Image: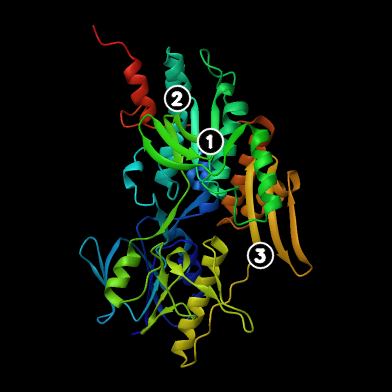
Amino acid sequence: MRPQVLIIGCGFGGLEAARALRSADVDITLVDKTNHHLFQPLLYQVATAGLSAPSIAAPIRHLFRRQRNVTTLLGEVVAIDPQARTVALKDGATLHWDHLIVAAGATHSYFGRDDWAPFAPGLKTLDDAFEIRRRVLMAFEAAEREDDPARRAALLQFVVVGGGPTGVELAGTFAEIARHTLPGEFRRIDPRQARVLLVEGGARVLQSMPERLCERAREQLTALGVEVKLAARVTGIDAEGLDITSAAGHERLLSRCIVWAAGVAASPLGRTLAQATGCTLDRAGRVVVEPDLSLQGHPNIQVIGDLAAAHSHVPGREPRPVPGVSPGAKQMGRYAAANIQRRLRGEATQAFRYADYGNLATIGRNSAVVDLDTPAGPLRFSGYFAWLFWLFAHVWFLIGFRNRFVVLVDWAWAYWTHDRHARVVAGGISAASPASAAAASARPPAG
């Protein structure tokens, strides 16, 4: 039998690892909890009704239909046995492996306050995007039916917690929806009166970028109508709103639509791996790996992507942490695949080197910031041309020609019309949503 390579997770890292082994004399089993690969950088567009799910997701089986050495399985790994070289799935099945690549990704972190999750969903999966989209649109629907001015104001106050790329993108797009997409569609409310707030605990938004670009991002958010609250720490979240503390003191913000974009934690599979192998986890739950991305004492197990606390090892330089971005996961996937082939040939593995090309973040229509590393030095710009650069860069890296074509058409239409075609919410008003709860409480009793 040929060597068995098991890849857990088909995010950017797992996808790249499987593709890089297309010509290798191995059999690959790819296991994922969902049946699709998701282009996460554009997930916020699904959450804000700008794109439909198929535009940024593709069935895993379809992606590997022509790669004959790949078997795709839908399943969730719950246990790993490094001695027997097996993993156990949630349904009781057992899979054997000779080489294991763990690319299980990350999830939300509420910094020990998981009780906030029902009131402030995060954005990591398509289910998350659908839920956020439903809450946003249902908030406007409930406000249309609300007679009490205070309740209506709470329904039309949208709060995004966290000033990283996801938070900035969501806040800017919420403002666009209220000011450009929805006006004229309601009779009792003016969507332009909606208030969008971005709450960030640090001193600036997009803290991984140079300070000048951070300030430009804040200015562009303000121009879009977003109120940015910096150095503001969230101390409580409930069904009615959230509490924040800043230099100005305590403030209570009434809101029925809060989105969490403030924290990321590694997949729980990292703890499972640590219990099985004795490997070390960092504070975020990521697995500390060797320079070649393997585990100490377990050279046939590699951890990549957001689950790995990896460093870039360039000769003559101090090792640098690899940021949790899609280019890092892709590069780690290719390195992991190459190191497996080196082991099969009896060669020494190589330390991982990360090529950092810079950071991009969009803020809204015609607004973005770009920080690139080029051979000639840093290239930093913002505004309309940064937005165009961001748009074409994201379209270029989408999976499949159809996805690229559909996204370009959708964006071109939205650019000229301000329309967001994916505003369909299944199921009507759900009693589980904060917005619908407010509408229900305003409804007079039957009889």
Numbered label attached to residue 357: 3
Residue linked to disc 2: 155
- Vertical arrangement, residue 113 with respect to residue 11, above or below: above
Is residue 202 something that shows in the picture?
A: yes
- Vertical arrangement, residue 23 with respect to residue 131, above or below: below
Instruction: Find the distance from the CA under tag 3 to the CA under tag 1.
Output: 39 Å
Q: Residues within 10 Å of mark 3 (few under 14, many from 20)?
A: few
What's the residue type where badge 1 is placed? Ala
Q: Is residue 111 left or right of residue 159?
A: left
Which numbered disc flags the more N-terminal residue, 2 or 1?
2
Q: Is residue 204 left or right of residue 39?
A: right
Residue linked to disc 1: 248
Which numbered disc flags the more N-terminal residue, 3 or 1?
1
What's the residue type where badge 2 is placed? Leu
Q: Residues within 10 Å of mark 2 (few under 14, many from 20)?
A: many
Q: Secondary structure at mark 1?
A: loop
Instruction: Find the distance from the CA under tag 3 to the CA under tag 2.
Output: 41 Å
Q: Secondary structure at mark 3?
A: loop
Q: Is residue 394 left or right of residue 270?
A: right
Residue located at (65% from left, 34% from top): 224
Residue located at (33% from left, 64% from top): 269
Q: Secondary structure at mark 2?
A: helix
Q: Is residue 420 left or right of residue 367?
A: left
Residue located at (60% from left, 34% from top): 226
Which numbered disc flags the more N-terminal residue, 3 or 2?
2
